Image: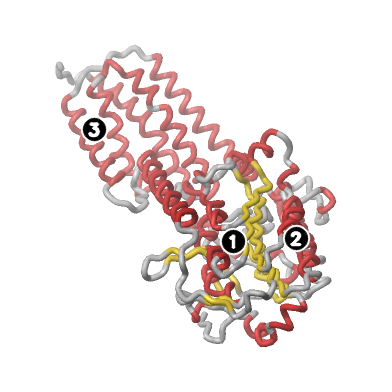
Amino acid sequence: MKKTSSSSDIKEYVLIYFYISFPITFPLFLSHDWKDLPLQLIASGGFLLPFTIFPQFRKLFIAAYLPFYIIYLAEICHTAIFKSPLTQSSVLTALDSTSAEAKEFIIHFFRLPILITVSLYLTVSIILTIFLFRRRTKLKYHFFLTFFSAAAFLFSVYNGFHTTYFNKNQLLPYKFIQIIKIRQEQINNEKKQYTKYRLQTINGLKSNNPPYLPETYLIVIGESASRQHMQYYGAQRQTNPYSGKLITPFIFSNVQSPHALTVLSLKSILSMQTLSGKHISLLNIFRLSGFKVFWLSNQYYSGEDKELTNIYAFAADVQIFTNNVKDYLLVTEKNNYDKHLLPHLDNALQDKALKKVIFIHLAGSHAPYNRRFPPEFEVFGKNETNSFVKEVDDYDNSILYTDFLLSEMIKKISALPEQSFLLYFSDHGEDVQTTPKSCHCHSDVVQIQTPAMFEIPFLLWTNKTYNLANTNLIKNLSVIQSRPFNTRDLIHSLPSLAGISYNEQNAAKNLFANTYRP
């Protein structure tokens, strides 16, 4: 290969370098994270390597680089919305999302500033690509340019793969490769735990209730419900007019979620790993205690076993998903109302099993909020002139609708002759305020996280039979209700409500025990 130092070649390589570095550095200008700019510029130079080795294929390499522009569009949108580059959990959540959830995410976060940002990025990208394609300059081989781009490539690879941790100095393609690998490992591990070993033994597992005693318990997991918007917790609007009419709930005033993302929260809430490395599922605790376990979900489900959000359902004896993604996208949008769970709840309650625990996973108050309640529950405001305020109204309407559904479930447990309770809590909260700084979202991005994303409702309704059989616990609840509690310790606490204990249960983390330590 003939060496040359033509100034026209250098100019052409500078243009190509700008084409390569533009999508990589554009998000940094949005986040004002200038300290990372030098490293990103160096790493960008690594993608010059194929241009310098095979300059005759310049147009082919330009076309091959276009997918990078698409990949970095995700980083730009994330930065524009959350003021932060993509994080590991954000990408994992996106990979775990269905097409319907992705569609709703775009609808909810569509804003004029984001549209302008994306339009600017795409406009520059198109102009750059067309400009470089139309140039007829013939590049020549440059030894020193090849040497420096090779060094930059090795630098980018080192930053991309030298560690298993999510490194903010990694280029995005390396992050995606790493995260996809991490996600697949998680899926394989969870499937292994919830399928192959779903009948594992749990040391010391026992129940204080006799095997012939009928029991029925409902565990309702809400979605994106913040207690700040609940009348039970002092909200000015009457968002809880239904669920307290028949049975007065026990209101736990100081409960937080472990994370502000559904996947991470459910993993912490529904499972744990013991000191010996053993994986224990909350659903398995009930199954192995003689309960028939039901999982009724209105969360989006694609029918595949590669969704971390739904993989915890595999430990249940009966799994029902009412919100099929294909039906949602192809037929109608009304399928996402949580009321469609009620007939399946009736079937579960009529099941002949003596002991039943029914987990109910709501769509709840997940954005976009106006899709979470039917028209007859549009009670709070119709601020058509202010979409930001209308979102607050819609969110409160979704809380109201959830309260109505809880009341329907409470009617059912109150009519049961066996001892029964209904426990309701949310996977995480949501920041939905009328102040401009409110993102109307939940997120793992620390810079925008607020207490509202973690402060969740935690409500317990018990029927008369349960109260008579658990008098000491009912008497102590007045003290227990004010205890600080994180739902990551639910696996240590919930079983005791059903009279179940096991060796790995930590008495200091059991909310309902006298030995509890916040």
Residue visible at 47% across and 44% down? 30
Q: CA distance from mark 1 to mark 2?
A: 31 Å
Instruction: Say which mark, if any, is on residue 428.
Output: 1
Q: Is residue 113 visible?
A: no
Q: Earlier in the sequence, mark 1 or mark 2?
A: 2
Outermost residue toward the top in this view: 136
Q: Are marks 3 and 2 in contact (CB under 8 Å)?
A: no
Residue visible at 66% across and 68% down? 355
Q: Tell me where residue 55 sits by quadrant.
A: top left
Q: Would you name the residue on which mark 3 appears?
A: 149
Nearest to viewer (mark 1 / mark 2): 2
* Secondary structure of the residue carrying numbered label 3: helix
| Amino acid tagged 2 | Gln
Q: Is residue 344 visible?
A: yes
Determine crowd level at label 1: few under 14, some 14-19, many 20+ residues with C-alpha closer than 10 A: many
| Amino acid tagged 3 | Ser
Q: Would you name the residue on which mark 2 appears?
A: 350
* Secondary structure of the residue carrying numbered label 1: loop
| Amino acid tagged 1 | His
